[in-house]
Every structure is written in C-alpha cells, then in structure tokens.
Amino acid sequence: MLDIQGVSKTFRDADGAAWLLADRLDLSVGRGQIVAVLGPSGSGKSTLLKIVAGLEPSDAGSIFFDGADLARVPPEQRGFALMFQDFALFPHLDVCDNVAFGLVEQRQSRRHARARAQELLAVFGLAAHARSRIWTLSGGEQQRVALARALITAPRLLLLDEPFSSLDAGLRTGLREEFVQRIRAAGMATVLVTHDESEARAMAQRGYRLTGGKLHSLW
C-alpha cells in the first residue's frame, strides 16, 4: 500500500518566482487499486509522481510503502514503474529488448529477460513484432510495449503520467480497458495522472483534483 503523508513542494522558476505545487498532501493507494489525480498543466501532478518515484525531493512529508519509509531508498530500489506520456521507449533497441530492459538492469541474464519479454509480448498480441524497431509500430502498439516493459519487473506500484494523451479517442478507450484488466490481474497499486476526467472515471476507483497545492476528492 502506498501512503503519502504531508508532502509539500514549492517550485521556483529562473526569475525567483515561487508557487506551491503540493501543500501537505495525504493520499493512500491499496494493492490492485487505481487512484486518479486530475488537474491542468502546471498544477503539480507530474511532480507528485516524481516525488513518489524518488526522482525529485519533496520539501516536507514522507512516502511509505507497506509501512516502510522510502526516504533513504533510491528510485531503482523502490520497485516502482513510471510510464510517461511519450512512452519513453528506446529507439536503438528492438521491441523485445525494450521490454526486457528492466530485467537486464536487475542483472538477470539477457537470455532469461528476453524469454520473459517474449511471453509478455504474446500476452499483448505483439509476438510477431518482437524483433521490430519501435518506430515501425503504431501508437497503440507502442503503448502496449511500454506497458509490457513496466509490468515485466512485477512492480509494486505503477505511476501513469498522461499515458493516453498522444492517442486518438477510439484507441484510448480500448487501451484504458486493457490497462485496467492488466493492473487488476497483477494486483498493483496505481496512480493515474491525467487531465481527462472521463478517462479517470473509467479507470479509477477514486479520483482527486490537484489545485492550489491541495487534493480535492471528486469521487
């Protein structure tokens, strides 16, 4: 279970101007649960994900997972997966090696990592594209590759940052249903950041709007 307690963050630009992105935020997310955080650009949604992932420090507050304080745990040891809106796939690697990357980084053998990647690609209907280059895939196929890459390490927490924003409406609908099924099957706690309330309501059990540094419950 993810437990965010009293997290605060002030952003300062190059001119010294400051504004509050997070003001003593509290949020909990259980296993297999999807919680959505909505808000306009610049409201601090993505920054909150980065704080949880350990990629950016908070000014105050604590992040716990299953009761353990993550203050001194580096990002690569948290067991979390962060998916960006641009997919962040590696153009110099083929589809299989993109998916296998996380296991290779964990020092598992490349042979094992590729075998596991092939299994996941089959689950996502992408087995025929295992040796294809990323740029040859459609947007929806790339998104499936990104999700397979996130799931291969069996993360404890999945952080989704506007994962469908670059896709057309019809494709978004099908993919978000697939994401929900995969997330629930894996039993992962998930935080979904989006500006699209209809998308959030279709996927998440609970939803909040982040504005003025505060989380306001929507459902």
Image (spheres, grey):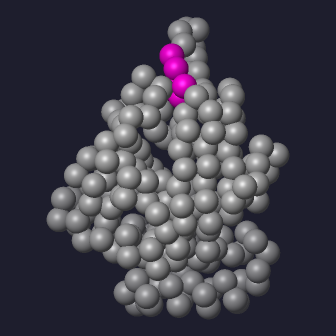
Percent from the top left, x then y, of residue 98? 56, 72
Stretch in magenta: 19-23
Q: Residue at x 27, y 60 (%)?
A: 202
* 17, above or below 3, in the image: above
* 25, above or below 77, in the image: above
Q: Nearer the viewer, residue 67 or 137?
A: 67
Percent from the top left, x then y, of residue 160? 46, 55
Would you say the magenta stretch is mainly helix, strand or loop? strand
Is residue 22 found inside the magenta-colored segment of the image? Answer: yes
Q: Residue at x 82, y 46 (%)?
A: 72
* 15, above or below 91, in the image: above
Q: Is residue 140 visible?
A: no
Q: Residue at x 68, y 56 (%)?
A: 65
Q: Is residue 17 visible?
A: yes
Image check: 160 left or right of 149?
Answer: left
Image check: 86 left or right of 78?
Answer: left
